[in-house]
Image: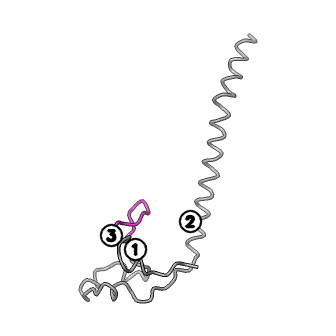
Amino acid sequence: MNETLFVITGLLIRIGLPVLFTAIVVVLLRKMDEHWQAESRHLPVAAMQKPCWETKGCSPEKRAQCAACESGQPCWQVFRAADGTLKEECLACDVFIQAPIPA
């Protein structure tokens, strides 16, 4: 009986504690991520020098169909990928490169 108890206790220590520690770290990281996302929503977005359609020279027809023109946000924010990453074309765009860094 004692040997079985020792084996069970050993398994709990060897497996249970790392799993518990990992779960605690995951919960804390998720809370930190939620906090950072909420904080970023309240940060003012630095205004661009010129709207992107002026920098790119977009036609009025293209501007009428562009979601960035209607939103008032920088174009790279509007056209982010579904997972939140910037598209490759945005990283090489002059509008993104010349944008002021938020304070």
Q: Does the magenta segment cover residue 87?
A: yes
Look at the picture and state if 87 lies above or below 64.
above
Name the mark on residue 37.
2
Look at the picture and state if 1 lies above or below 86.
above
Give yes or no for contact between labels 3 and 2 (Cβ–Cβ under 8 Å): no
Nearer-the-camera pick, 38 or 100: 100
Q: Residue at x 29, y 85 (%)?
A: 63
SS state under label 3: helix
In the picture as drawn, the residue positioned furthest to the right comes out as 2
Q: Quadrant of residue 91?
A: bottom left
Residue range highlighted in magenta: 80-88
Q: Which residue is mark 1?
A: 76
Three-letter amino acid code of the residue under disc 1: Trp
Label 2 – label 1 distance at C-alpha: 17 Å
Instruction: Judge the density around disc 2: few (<14), some (14-19), many (≥20) Cα neighbours within 10 Å.
Output: few
Which badge, 2 or 1, comes first in the chain's sequence? 2
Q: Quadrant of residue 70?
A: bottom left
Q: Position of residue 61 (x, y in %)?
A: 23, 86
